[in-house]
Image: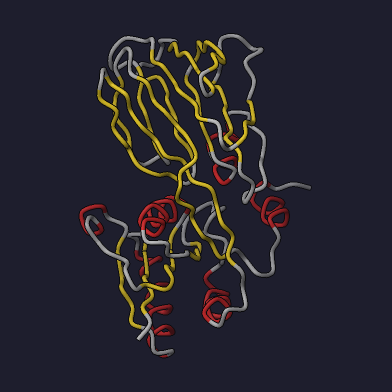
Amino acid sequence: MSKVALFVKDSEEAKSTASEILEFLKSKGYKVLKLLNRPELTRGVSLRGVRLMVVVGGDGTFLAGARLASRFGVPLVGVNEGRFGFLTEMEKHEAIDILREVLSGKIEKQRRMMLSTYLVRGKVRKFLGDYLNDVVVSKSAIARIMEIEVFANEDFMVHIYGDGVIVSTPTGSTAYALSAGGPIIYPDSENLLFVPICPHTLSNRPVVLPANFSLRLRILSPDRACYLTMDGQKGMYLKNGDVVEVRRSRRYCEIYTHPKKSCFEILRGKLKWG
C-alpha cells in the first residue's frame, strides 16, 4: 500500500481541512501518516516509503515540512490554511481535485534549490541544516548597528554596517528578502541572493550570485549583538568572530505547483499587482 504524509498546521481550521483530505486519501487506498507541525512530534520521524507529503497550513508549515521531506526525497504539495500562501498555492476548495491529478501523475514537479548552512566558531565547523527560503543575520539589540564582513568564495565582497543581511534562494526571494528591497527571482532558478537589511551605506545594494558561490559572513559585532535565523524558524545568538557559511545544498526540495496558475498569476494575486 502506498503511503502519503499529511503535515498539518496546529490550528482548528487546518485540522478540519486535513480531515477531508485524509478521508479522500483513504478512499483511494493510501496509507496516511498524519503529522502535526510541532517539533516535539516530528523529531526523529522517518518518511521512508512515503510517496508524497501534503502540507495543510501556511508558508511556515510548508517550510518545516520541506526540511523534513527533502531529507527523504519526498515531494510536497501545499494547501493554504495560512495568511499569505506563496508556497501553499492550492486553496482548500480545489485541494481534492488537484491531489487527484498529482496522484495520477498528471502534474510535473518543480525542483527548488536549498541552502546548506554552517557555523564556524574557533576551530569547530558545525552543520546547521538545509533550508528552503533564507538565512538571516540580524541585530539583536534595538538601537545598535551591527558590523559584518562578507566574502563571496574567497574574495572579499563588502563590509556591512546596518541591521543585518539576508542570503536567500529564489524561492525565498518573495519572503523577507522582498521586504528588504531584494528582487524577485523565478522560483526554479538557481542563484544565491544577497540582500543587506537597512545598510548604513546606501550604495550597498542586493546582489544576485551564481549558485556555485558560497558566502561567508564574519561577525565583527560584540557577543550576542547578532542573531542567526534560518527559514524564520530556527535560530541562535552569534559571537564576535563567528563565521556563518551559506552555500547551495546538495539536496533539493521537489514541489508540485498549481496546475492552472502560473508563477506570475500567483504574484499578481498575492502582491496585488494591477
The structure residue drawn at horizontal position 55% and vertical position 52%, both measured from the top left corner, is: 112
Q: Nearer the viewer, residue 12 or 111?
A: 111
The structure residue drawn at horizontal position 38% and vertical position 10%, both measured from the top left corner, is: 220
Quarter of the image where one finds residue 33: bottom left
Q: Is residue 78 left or right of residue 188?
A: left
Across and down, in percent, residue 80 comes to 50, 62
Against 105, residue 256 (above or below) is above
Across and down, in percent, residue 97 comes to 57, 80
Q: Quadrant of the N terminus?
A: bottom left
Q: Is residue 11 left or right of residue 250?
A: left
Quarter of the image where one finds residue 38: bottom left
Q: Is residue 85 left or right of residue 53?
A: right
Q: Nearer the viewer, residue 29 or 2?
A: 2
Quarter of the image where one finds residue 17: bottom left
Q: Is residue 151 left or right of residue 263?
A: left
Against 155, residue 79 (above or below) is below
